[in-house]
Amino acid sequence: MRQMQLLLLLAFLLAADTLCAQSKAVIRGKIQKSLSQEVIVASYPSPLLPEEVQLVAKLENGRFELEIPITQPTLVELVHGNEEIPVYLEPGYELQLSLHGQKLQKSAKFKGKGAAENNFLSSYNLRFDEEEDYQPLPDNIKLREQEFLSFLKERREDQLAALEKYTDSKTVSETFRKVMLAEIAFSYANDRLTYFSLREQVIINDASPAPSAAYYTFLQELNLNQPENLTSISFTSFMRNYVAYLSQQANLSSNDRHFYRKSYDLVSQRLSGESRTMAQAHLIRTSLQQGNVLHAPAMLQHFGRTANKPLLHASLTQLLDSYSGLGIGSAAPDFKLKDVDGNEVSLQDFRGKVIYLGFWRTNCGLCMIEQPHAQELARRLAAHDVVVMHIGVDEDERAWRQVVESRGRFGVQLHLKGQGAELVKQYGLKDVPAYFLIDETGSIISTKPRRPNDREVENDILQHVTRGRAYAK
């Protein structure tokens, strides 16, 4: 009897250990000629809510180990220095990875459980994502409609052939194969969908004809609700552009203050399943980022009632609750504050430039973590009409000055005594760090721009610079 109890206990422990192993993936690696002392894995726990989560591992003699909690297949980015590579993970994967710091993508070699999938993904990205010949930009976008469609068709055929050839000789999971098929399908769909709008931006005063009658019929052939779609990066991009396309086809204007509610109602009627949930969440989130909260409570109420996504609904509700009251197009509250050298600086001094404005405090941990990223952002944007401006709200000016001096005085650094100041109230700050994006005329572009440590923040800001220059012309 006692032997039977021990056997049952052993079986239970083995089952528990297996279950635990299946709720995570492990990446162990060695980097030759490392660029920094850490490796970061950036992931999006929910594909429906683009909020990045980072795990950091310190290098010890060039080696690292990361345990990533996951419950379903996912794509993450492994970042080292300024280099990054995508990694496909399923629960239970145990990967061994060898890398060269200065050529991460080309040197990546995987072993262990999940190696076959990731070695293909690495070679696929090198061939199809890194080669300009396979991308719309810079040259293929200049092709006429039929030539461009031929380019997309040939690229898709090459991608499918590469996948088929690899899976004929290597065993990969069926889920991964379907994810790659979704990636191929929606990279084609996204590039085809955005062809005319992108071409118009690239070729100034181009008298290209309107789309042919059958150009958009491919949209009817897409399956938007395959489970694997949510793991595809191209599907996420496609859905954002597809929502814009549906709104455009319905003659909805983004200048209409009811635009987001009308677009929300449109996708609620036209879409179903997870694609509808993704589109609805995208519109709610974007409306809040743009400071358009007119219909946000009603959209959130409908979303909570129909989407059956309580965590996503709670996150969007929290975003609404944090809304500062400044809306898109509102004049950014002006100020006159002193910099490190005692010079008086006002917002008006930077008319004609886009301003990335941040509020921070020296005893705020997250603020201090984001400071190096803000410093790097300021360096990268220095050649553009962009000002990275940070206002420290410390009661102790000496503490603020000491940190600013030690960090190298990047951007424009100003001091405001305490979070109880009137300017803090005018900007509706509840806590720091907080960021605002202000256009060349001093109007609010966004009350919730991407944070300095978000890898897309630079692209977002430069898009506003490009638009501003186009309007000026």
Image (tube, rainbow, N blue to C red):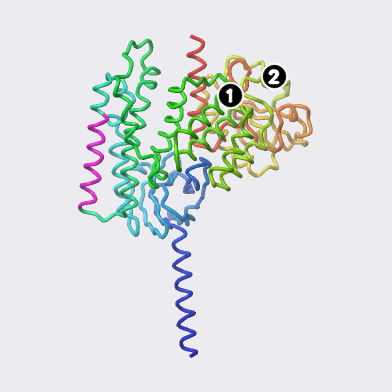
Q: Which residue is mark 1?
A: 258
Residue bearing mark 2 = 346
- Who's the residue at 45% across and 57% down the image? 65
Where residue 371 appears, as percent x and y from the top left, is 60, 37
Q: Nearer the viewer, residue 337 or 158?
A: 158
Nearest the viewer among 121 and 409 is 121
Q: Identify which amino acid the numbered label 2 is placed on.
A: Ser
Amino acid tagged 1: His
Q: Which residues are magenta?
A: 152-168
User: In the rendering, at what x and y percent does residue 6 appear?
Assistant: 48, 84
SS type, badge 1: loop
Query: Is disc 1 in contact with disc 2, using a CB cutoff of under 8 Å?
Result: no
Q: Is residue 206 above or below residue 56?
A: above
Disc sitting over residue 337 in the figure: none
Looking at the image, which residue sits at the far bottom? 1
Give residue 209's quadrant in the image.
top left
218 inside magenta stretch: no
In the rendered view, tell whether residue 359 sits above or below residue 274: above
* Distance between mark 1 and mark 2 Cα atoms: 34 Å
Judging depth in this view, the residue of 171 and 61 nearest the camera is: 171
Question: How busy is the neighbourhood of tag 1: few (under 14 within 10 Å), some, or many (20 plus)?
Answer: some
